Image (cartoon, helix red, strand yellow):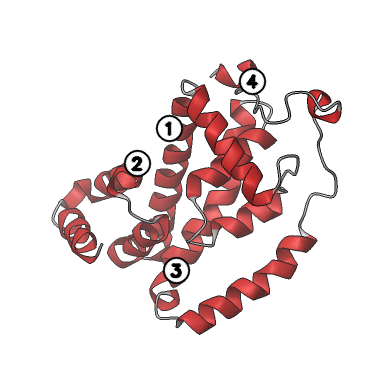
Amino acid sequence: MEQISAVVLTIVESSGMFAPFLFIAFHLLRPILFMPVAFICVSGGILFGMVSGTIYSVVGITLSSLMFYRMITFMPKTFNRLVKMKGKIIGQNRQMSKGQIVLLRLMPFIHFHLLSICIIEMSRNYKEYFKLSILSNIPLAFVYTSFGKWISTFSPLIVMIVVLAFIPVLYLLRQKEIVIKWEVFFNKDEKNVPELPTHRRAY
């Protein structure tokens, strides 16, 4: 990871006026390169400063989220697997609130696109998904671009304390209702995960 990080910084630094575009491109290539979102945001702060780095990261992360949406609509089996994974972690019939999504985005060990699945389930259409993605991406980009280098110096003990402090907040931000699907209520096909609704295929 350190070698990849050094290469990314070197390439972007040496690209001159194309540096912002290349930086945004690295956000799109991040899943292929297995690079954490937080690391790229931290790099943006080092390379471009707090304001420009945050803007470029918001653009890059949001484009990555939109690209994920477009891809997942053509891969219903993958979508179903991710929904099942989400169900095992937070509960099959439990939906997260917007506040919980924003807070969990800040935790680097939470899979980025697993939260994107939660946003898809919360959204009625592509436009709403876009708005919720930006809402959750701005705090992520700002925090790690502005304070990421400092946060990376935290010891494991401090990280654990911060995570434990987040738990009560996550509880307070919870959605206070449970959505139970009709067929699950009547104990039919409980193990089946519905495919991505057709209204989400429209762009």
Task: Tell whether 152 sits left or right of 4.
Answer: right
Q: Could you say whether the residue bearing mark 3 is in a helix, strand or loop?
A: helix
* Tag 1 residue: 67
Which-is-in-front pick, marks 1 and 4? 4
Query: Which circle's residue, 3 or 4, is located before the other in the chain?
Result: 3
For the residue marked with disc 3, what is the amino acid?
Answer: Ser
On screen, residue 77 above or below 22: above
Residue that appears at 51% across and 83% down: 157
Query: Which circle's residue, 2 or 1, is located before the other in the chain?
Result: 2
CA gap between label 4 and label 2 equals 25 Å
On screen, residue 79 above or below 58: above
Residue 146: mark in rendering: 3
Task: Tell whether 83 sits left or right of 16.
Answer: right
Task: Tell whether 88 sits left or right of 15.
Answer: right
For the residue marked with disc 4, what is the amino acid?
Answer: Pro
Which-is-in-front pick, marks 3 and 1? 1
* Tag 2 residue: 28
| Residue situated in front as seen by the camera: 28 or 94 | 94
Q: Are marks 3 and 1 in contact (CB under 8 Å)?
A: no
Residue 197: mark in rendering: 4
Residue that appears at 63% across and 50% down: 89
Which-is-in-front pick, marks 4 and 2? 4
Which-is-in-front pick, marks 3 and 4? 4
Query: Which circle's residue, 2 or 3, is located before the other in the chain?
Result: 2
Task: Indicate the position of residue 8 as horizontal and vertical percent values.
Answer: 21, 56
Residue 102: mark in rendering: none
